[in-house]
Image (tube, rainbow, N blue to C red):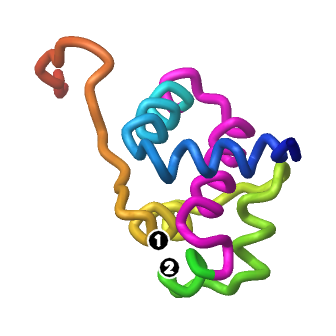
Amino acid sequence: MKSKLHDEAMAELYANDPTLALDVINGILEDGDHGELLIVLRQLAQAFGGVQAVAKQANLNPTQLYRTLSPTGNPGLNSLTAILRAMGLRLAIQPLGPLAPIQTK
């Protein structure tokens, strides 16, 4: 039996179970590991038809998207939200704990 590359296997898992992808991304965001987030976004891009398809949906240059999702990439907020939107996702802000009133002077 032919073995699959890890990224291809993960892309297939995410395509078959989108909830798993959400759980993984949210876990990464809690830990704050930038590199892991880029890996999962690359794998998700594969699950959504590849970087070319995601770039087209996000109105981004495919070459720039490859660079953005590379291990040394650093996506800006505009790019990140466009990439996520192309995958049917969005960023959301959640409190770390109970919210206290903001004190002003």
Q: 69 or 95: nearer the eye?
A: 69
Tag 2 near tag 1, CB within 8 Å:
yes
Secondary structure at badge 2 equals helix
Q: 27 or 1: nearer the eye?
A: 1
Instruction: Tell me, yes or no, whether the highlighted magenta stretch contains residue 53.
Output: no
- Which image quadrant: the C terminus? top left
Going by the numbered disc 2, the residue's amino acid type is Ala
Secondary structure at badge 1 equals helix
Residue 58's tag is 2
Q: Is residue 76 above or below residue 97?
A: below
Region of the chain picked out in magenta, as a range: 29-52
What residue is shown at x 60% (from left), y 50% (from top)?
A: 12
Residue 58 position, x and y percent, is: 50, 79
Q: 104 or 51: nearer the eye?
A: 51
Residue at the far left in the pictured view:
101
Mark 2, other Cα within 10 Å: few <14 / some 14–19 / many ≥20: many
Q: Quadrant of residue 87?
A: bottom left
What residue is shown at x 48% (from left), y 40% (from top)?
A: 21
Q: Which callout, 2 or 1, points at the residue further toward the start of the chain?
A: 2
- Which image quadrant: the N terminus? top right
Magenta stretch secondary structure, dominant: helix
Mark 1, other Cα within 10 Å: few <14 / some 14–19 / many ≥20: many
Residue at numbered disc 1: 82
Residue 51's tag is none
Q: 70 or 9: nearer the eye?
A: 9
Residue 99 position, x and y percent, is: 17, 18
66 displayed left or right of 47: right
Going by the numbered disc 1, the residue's amino acid type is Ala
